[in-house]
Image: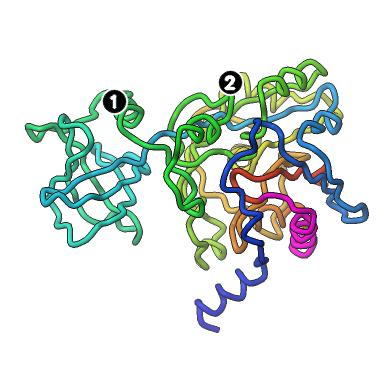
Amino acid sequence: MKNSDELEALLAAYDFDLPTEQLALRPPSVRGRSRLLVVHPSGETAPADRLFADLGEYLRAGDLLVLNEARVSKRRVPLRRGTGARLEALFLSEEPGGAWRCLIRGKRRIKAGEALQGPSRDVRFRYRGESGDGASYVLSPELADGKPAWTRAGEAENYFAAFGETPLPPYLNRPADEADQDRYQTVYANTPGSVAAPTAGLHFPPSMLESLEGIGVHIVRLRLDVGYGTFAPLQLRQYQTGELHEEQYEIGEEAAGLLNNRTPGSRLLAVGTTTLRALESNRRQFGVFRPGRHRTRLFLRPPDRPRTADMLLTNFHLPRSSLLMLVACLLGREHSLEVYRRAIDLGYRFYSYGDAMLILPFST
């Protein structure tokens, strides 16, 4: 079987049809006013159609609620060529030497060495060519005199905050508006660095976190900077090797202490696939939860099983995606697709701005 045929057979096993009207183009009118499909991993009990506000009924004193506090950076920046032609760059990550790996929209016949002007006259971007991954390109920020720009900590993020736009998922196919500046960000977002939101956390209003703490649930925060690779088509090599796009994450001393010293009988609820990826990566690499900044390429797909979390809160994901395969690690492929079909029949909204699913305790 050719690689292309093998990949298609793999992806087809995780495919489903979603009515266009169930793709959530906008968030609910009020944060937290979402639906919640509660799923039993065994499949012996039908999924329960609840509201997100009911989440606390499934938690108890001593449980850990682990959040990804990554903040989405406004890294979509409009650029202009010397000819006046307009482009757009999404700044993905800083490379050694101060250059940046980017996705460029509107790129046509740009030559290495060409200077592209940004929104500010103080900074321009020198095009260096392809990055080597087959999808992105390299830009070097520089001052008007040709010297490197963004040489001090925080300068790049200050520039993005002043001149950039929030990068929305590509399937929304629209520019970010004022409402997105607030709603495509969790209420507990902290350090900037992500190019996509940890969307399971978008549902939480501050009042819910306060009420959960009030019943004795421990709130644990870590950070995984979500990369644009989360939207990239899956490659056969990634499935075969168990390695996806690289992302950086950080676990603090306090968080590691809480994770390593759980009360017997307590459960850990991972809020989102990015949180679960950070937890699994750290524990698998070190045996215990080790604080610090780390990198991961971990790809959780069947027959992998999670070793760190007891429950998962997640949105409904794209068909044929690595995230749907992660869900299948917990529910099995057929059960996952059955749950998704049930959600579609019930009219649930899908993807980043859509409704949520709670997977109840599964065997670890």
Q: Position of residue 129 (x, y in %)?
A: 21, 55
Q: Position of residue 3 (x, y in %)?
A: 50, 77
Q: Residue at x 30, y 42 (%)?
A: 95
User: Does residue 125 appear to the left or right of 318 in the view shown?
Assistant: left
Q: Where is mark 2, residue-wise?
A: 253
Q: Is residue 335 magenta?
A: yes
In this view, the residue farthest toward the top is: 214
Q: Residue at x 11, y 52 (%)?
A: 83
Q: Nearer the viewer, residue 19 or 329?
A: 19
Q: Position of residue 211 (x, y in %)?
A: 77, 19
On-image quarter of the C terminus: top right
- Amino acid of disc 2: Glu
Q: Secondary structure at mark 2?
A: helix
Q: Secondary structure at mark 1?
A: helix
**Structural crowding at the residue carrying mark 1, measured as other residues with C-alpha within 10 Å and reported as few (<14), some (14–19) or many (≥20):** few
**Structural crowding at the residue carrying mark 2, measured as other residues with C-alpha within 10 Å and reported as few (<14), some (14–19) or many (≥20):** few
Q: Residue at x 32, y 39 (%)?
A: 94
In this rendering, is residue 99 above or below 218?
A: below
- Disc with the residue nearer the chain's start (1 vs 2): 1
Q: Position of residue 325 (x, y in %)?
A: 65, 58
In this rendering, is residue 126 above or below 258?
A: below
- Amino acid of disc 1: Glu
To which quarter of the image does residue 265 belong?
Answer: top right
Please provide the residue range marked out in magenta: 332-349
On-image quarter of the N terminus: bottom right
Q: Where is mark 1, residue-wise?
A: 155
What is the number of the mark on residue 291? none
Mark nearest the camera among 1 and 2 is 1
Q: How many marks?
A: 2
Q: Nearer the viewer, residue 254 or 20?
A: 20
Q: Main secondary structure of the magenta part?
A: helix
In this rendering, is residue 27 above or below 56?
A: below
